[in-house]
Image (cartoon, rainbow, N blue to C red):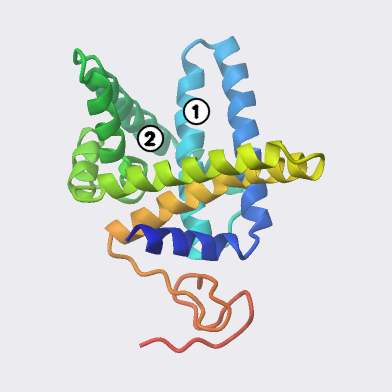
Amino acid sequence: MLMKIYGNAFKVLMKKPLKLWGIILLGIVLSGVLGGLCGFLIPGLALSVGLLMGTSMTIIFLKGYRGEEVSTTDLFACFKDWNTIKRIVLGMAWMALWIFIWSLIPIVGPIFAIIRTYEYRLTPYILMFEPEVPITEAIKISAQKTNGYKLQMFLAELLAGFIYGLACGILAIIPVLGWIALLIVTALFPLFMGLVQAAFYEEINGATTVFCTNCGQPMAGNSQFCANCGTAVHQG
């Protein structure tokens, strides 16, 4: 399954989604700027802003993976109303609190914290897409859904980190062009990992992302025509 996840994420990446990439980079910058300003003005508010922006970017990755249109307004999807803000902040803070509590166990705490991190990986999706789930139950639902997938998610990130580190080591010793390539690889890495996480979410939920039979790019929604090459794709 790991190769399938990587393969699907690469299909999206090979489409050269510059708009998605740019929005994600903008989101990273905004998170830092807004977090810094909020933390300076109202101590503690920076955490809330970080949780909201982080969840918004998680949803943007999913839309990009599905081949749906993304825009800069998506960065503020979690800010649209008070109920959404409260649900995301409290739900994600509850998740972080439990990961921290698990980490306090003597000796084996860090290991349990890592396990819970992957166990709760679907929490932002549940908070956004399953409003009927109580805030404090989102991590439990995530734990149920990720049962049997945690090791795969861990290996996916471990392998990607190893490849990234190896690429950085090789490119760093190449004059000039190597450093330019290194900057590009470093900028693309968060995009790829976000797409990998989105691919796991789709896989776990049994959703099928349809890829164009002509160019291999993801089809948006139930569209019968590929937005990338215009080919009519007949399903079923």
Locate residue 138 relative to residue 20 in the image: left or right. Answer: left
**Between 131 and 66, which is closer to the camera in this rendering?**
66
**Between 189 and 54, which is closer to the camera in this rendering?**
189
According to the picture, the residue beneath numbered tag 2 turns out to be 88
Q: Residue sitting at 34 percent across and 35 percent down?
A: 87
Q: Position of residue 127 (x, y in %)?
A: 33, 42
CB within 8 Å, label 1 to label 2? no
According to the picture, the residue beneath numbered tag 1 turns out to be 50
Q: Residue sitting at 63 percent across and 74 percent down?
A: 228
Q: Position of residue 115 (x, y in %)?
A: 25, 34
Dot 2: within a 10 Å radius of its alpha carbon, few (fewer than 14), some, or many (20 or more) residues?
A: many
Locate residue 216 relative to residue 29 in the image: left or right. Answer: left
Between discs 1 and 2, the one toward the N terminus: 1
Dot 1: within a 10 Å radius of its alpha carbon, few (fewer than 14), some, or many (20 or more) residues?
A: some
> In this orientation, does residue 68 appear?
no
Q: Measure the C-alpha gap from mark 1 to mark 2.
A: 11 Å
